[in-house]
Each structure stands twice: as structure tokens, then as C-alpha cells.
Image: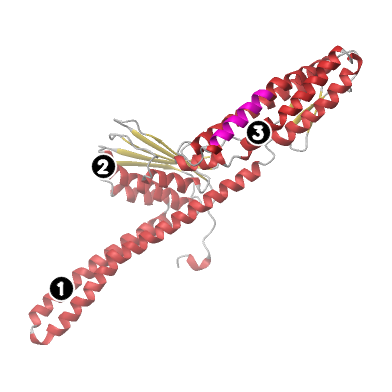
Amino acid sequence: MSGDRGAGGELVEKPPPPRFPLDRWARRETLHLLLNLPFGLLGFVYAVTTLALGAGLAVTVIGLPLLAASLAGSRRLGRAERTRARVLLGVRVEEPSPLPLRGRPYLVRLRTMLADPVAWRAALYAVIRLPWGVLTFALALVSLLVLWPLLPYLARWLTDVDRMMVRGLLSPSDELERRIAELESDRGVVVDTAAADLRRIERDLHDGAQARLVNLAMGLGLAKEKLLEDPDTAALMVDEAHGEVKLALQELRDLARGIHPAVLTDRGLDAALSSVATRCTVPVRVTTDMGGRPAAAIEGIAYFTVSELLQNVSKHSRARSASVEVWRSGDRLLIQVEDDGQGGASLEGGTGMAGLADRLGAVDGLFMVDSPVGGPTTVTAELPWRDRVADPPSERKG
């Protein structure tokens, strides 16, 4: 038995030239042709019924989830057809990679399933296979009964068409297209997240430091008017203005820390996470084992992920203690935050957890929550490890 690789990278077991009487390959190919009708009928009925039902109900609440579920079923039918082609025709088509659904919000999972090119091509394969299955079943049956000497040659010709169809429609040749679609979706998430962050910064400036500075300017103006006629009152007003200046500066520092804390830039993730842990309302143990620093963007995402998770621990968990572990495993940066609180955390319902999952998904990361009611809660995040590049000369100290 010899093997080679097809154009799409799939392994192909090359059968010997057909000959009479029937050899092992001719029997396998004939069986494949006879099975084309039942398999084609099953696939056609499934694809047409479920896709038509899902598309017809798309205007209702259940339509799109039903369509996504039918596409998931088409993926499974495609796997069955690849198995049949491997066993009977010697075509070893590589399995497509699974959809990146774990840890993602419901709407993101639904969109990913609806845009899955592997499932749509499997559905197309199921539809066009029925007429071909009827033809090949009839020709194989007639050849078995009447054209026996020609059966090996006819079976080879017909199954070569089957091989081309399997390679063309059921191989993972357009995985790049799916990856591009994922990146386009993730880019939209990044844009939305950045816009939301800008709105938050604008709101914090408007309601916080800006309002204090306006009050400060008004207070100093009144103090100036009182300076000659009532120096004692003016001194009190200046003293109050001094307090307002301190509060405004503190709010600006907090806002700057929320954008990108200086300790993260200067001392790295370990020191920054230790600083965050001290602001949590429960004791937090921080453990890091990275052997270096990742790229600044990955480091920033890791910092803000842990920061928001510890805020959730403080506000919602009713925990007595928590822990943060960060380590590198190959080309991934792993984060695990645990607490012994009441549990019940979820990615559903547009929560902050869902926002974190979107942010990590946008950089090819993963976000998983294990939080049974009653606790404990374990949140695991994965980020791609990207090596840190040296800071440009203009940004270096000294």
C-alpha cells in the first residue's frame, strides 16, 4: 500500500490500477458506491430540513440558534463522510480544527457557529450528494448484475469523482478563511472595547477631576474677592481649595493607574499584581512564575484581567481569601484567580466577566469560569505569550 499527499495536504492511499476479477480495492469501491444512496438520502433530508427550518424561523427567537445547531450537525455528518472515504477509498482528509467556543459569551458563540465555513461546505456536500448517490447506486447495481467484467473500471472512475468531492468540500482547506473571519470579529470587539474605555475615561474626567477643578476655580475666585475685606474667610477658602487640589490630584492618579499603571511599566507584572492585591478587601496570595516579561500589550491585558477579577472578589464574592497565580506554559501565559466565596459567577447576561472573555478572545486568548453556587470560584485565563521588545530610546529612563 502506498501513500501520498493531495493538494489540500490530506493523506491519500493510492489504490493499484483496476483489474478483473474483483480485488480488495474493487470490492471496497463498489461498497462505497452502494452506500452512496442511503448516506446521500440521510444527508440531504437532514440538511434541507434543518437549514430550511432554521432559516424560515430566523425572524423568531429560536431561528438562529436552530440554524447554528443544524450547522453543528452538518459538521458531524461531514466527519462521518470523511471516515467513510478513509475506510473505503483510502482518502485520509485531516479533520478541521474545532470552533473556538469554550469560554466565550453566548452571542459570540452563536455568531461563530453561523459563520463556520466547514459546516456550510458539509451542508452543501450533503445536498449535492443525493443525485450523485442515486446515479452511482444504480450504475453499481446494474454492473453487479449485468456488466460484471466492467465493474472494477467503472467503480474506479466513479469513486475518483467521490474522492475529488471529499477533498474539495470536506477538507480543511479554507481554515484560513475561518481564521480571517474570527480575526475580523475580534477586531470589532477590540474597537468596541476601546470605545467603551474612552467613554469611561471621559466620564471619569467629567464627573471627577474636571468637576473638582471647576469648583476649585470658583472657590479661588471667591477667595480673591474676599481677600481684602475679609482675610480670615479668604484664608479658609484657600485652605478648602488646597484640599480640593489634593483630591483632584488623587483622582487623576487613580485614573492614570486605570489606563496604565506606572508600576507595571517600571517593575513588571509581579509587582503590579502585588499592588493590586493590597487594594482587595480580602487577603490575596500572589504567585508568579514567568521567567521573563511578555509583550507590553499582553502584560497590560493580564494586569487588567486580574485587577477586574479582584474587584469582583471585593464587591460580590463574600470571600475570606483569594489567590492569584500567573505562569508561563510554552507559548501561553496562564492566569488563575481563585476565591472561597459564594460562587455563582457567570459569563451570561452581559456581565463584566463577559467583557473580559471578549477582550481575551480578541487577542486569541481563552477565558473560563468555574463557579458553582456556594463556591468556590476559579477563573482561568490564557493569553498568547509574545516576547517583549526593547523600549524605544525616547521611552527609556535616564
- Please determine whether, in this image, residue 226 is positioned above or below residue 18: below
Q: Position of residue 394 (x, y in %)?
A: 50, 68
Horizontally, is 103 left or right of 83 in the view? left
Q: Quadrant of residue 341?
A: top left
Query: How far is the residue under mark 3 from the one under mark 1?
Result: 75 Å
- The amino acid on which the numbered mark 2 sits, given as a three-letter code, is Val
Q: Which mark is residue 239?
A: 1
The N terminus, quarter of image: top right
Magenta part of the chain: 41-54
- Main SS class of the magenta portion in the image: helix
Label 1 element class: helix
- The amino acid on which the numbered mark 3 sits, given as a three-letter code, is Ala
- The amino acid on which the numbered mark 1 sits, given as a three-letter code, is Asp
Label 3 element class: helix
Q: Is residue 47 visible in this depiction of the protein?
A: yes
Label 2 element class: loop
Other residues around mark 3 within 10 Å, as few (<14) / some (14–19) / many (≥20): many
User: Which residue has dot 3 on it?
Assistant: 122
| Picture residue at 29% right of the left edge, 48% below the top | 278
Which is nearer the eye, 256 or 272?
256
User: Considering only order in the chain, which callout, 3 or 2, is on the residue closer to the N terminus?
Assistant: 3
Which coloring applies here?
A: secondary structure
User: Considering only order in the chain, which callout, 1 or 2, is on the residue closer to the N terminus?
Assistant: 1
Q: Nearer the viewer, mark 3 or mark 1?
A: 3
Check residue 53 for magenta coloring: yes
User: Considering only order in the chain, which callout, 1 or 3, is on the residue closer to the N terminus?
Assistant: 3
| Picture residue at 55% right of the left edge, 40% below the top | 114
Query: How far is the residue under mark 2 from the one under mark 1?
Result: 36 Å
Q: Position of residue 337 (x, y in %)?
A: 37, 39
Other residues around mark 2 within 10 Å, as few (<14) / some (14–19) / many (≥20): some
Q: Which mark is residue 282?
A: 2
Horizontally, is 127 left or right of 369 in the view? right
